Image (cartoon, grey):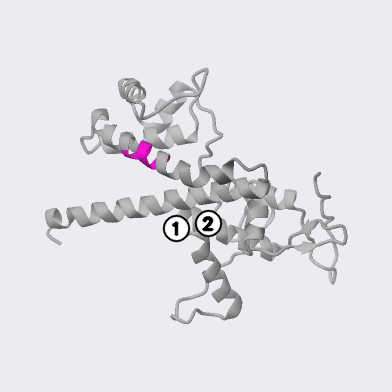
Amino acid sequence: MNEPAASTPSGAGRAPALMSIGEVLAQLRAEFPDVTISKLRFLEAEGLVEPQRTPAGYRKYGWDDVARLRFVLSAQRDQYLPLRVIRDQLAQWDGSDASPSGRARPNLVAVGPGGVVPGREPPEPVESPEVRLGRAELISRSGVDESTLVELERLGVLVSDPPGWYDGDALIIASAVAGLAAYGFQPRHLRAYRSAADREVGLFAQLVAPLARQSDPAARARAAETARELMALSQQLHAALVRVGLRSTLGR
């Protein structure tokens, strides 16, 4: 059941408008297209945001809550921070103007209608896995050529959804391959990436499957969050191992 929309008060001296969870979702979707109501409820359950409640139990969010959610979602997406680290940063922000280590507190910026931050250019749109691209558009937007795309599909590095649509992740993969090709990479070099990814999928699936199989939406949201954090940690580990491996080559 959808929660009722908040009315927008007008005139000086009135209390600031509060928003329903659906209205908050609409505010955040412009910058975070993958966010869902289940995700917002999950972040509340994790203690990262505390919306007010009406006598009937409906959630009501203020602009400070929206700014807090934007900080959490940005820290996850841009810095790959796990929730425990974000929670610590928010606790420091709530308790003082600066953390004990002397670092500035997180920059929680309130946003206006449509997710626009006053005085700031709108963010570049982030590709959502839900996007649907035809073959010609994928080639145009990613920079790969037809022969490379055919080889990527033959190797299983990139797959399409029937009847031939490509999602946002396919665009990311194709764009990365185009970038690597500029340095001399060929599709056959990507077999190792595919094999390594498959091994990680098998390992991570064992960890999140018990949660994902539950009917409770909160458990499924936790499964998605666990998978996201595992992927972020895996990316950090891979990058660090490659840096260590290249030190002798770079003479550092």
Residue 51 seen in the current view: yes
Kindly state the secondary structure of the residue where label 2 is placed.
helix
Magenta region includes residue 85? no
Q: Position of residue 78 (x, y in %)?
A: 46, 55
- Which residue appears at 52% of the width and 56% of the height? 74
Q: Which residue is mark 1?
A: 79
The magenta region covers 196-201
Q: Count up the numbered dots.
A: 2
In-image side of 218 versus 6 (left or right): left
- Depth check, front residue: 217 or 38: 217
Q: Residue furthest right?
A: 55
Sooner in the amino-acid sequence: mark 1 or mark 2: 2
Q: Which residue is mark 2?
A: 74
In the rendered view, tell whether residue 211 sits above or below residue 108.
above
In-image side of 125 versus 150 (left or right): right
Q: Amino acid at mark 2?
A: Ser
Quadrant containing the C terminus is bottom left
In-image side of 128 versus 57 (left or right): left
Magenta span main SS: helix
Q: Position of residue 185 (x, y in %)?
A: 23, 34
- Which residue appears at 73% of the width and 62% of the height? 51
Q: Position of residue 184 (x, y in %)?
A: 20, 35
Q: Amino acid at mark 1?
A: Gln
Q: Are marks 1 and 2 in contact (CB under 8 Å)?
A: yes
- Depth check, front residue: 39 or 174: 39
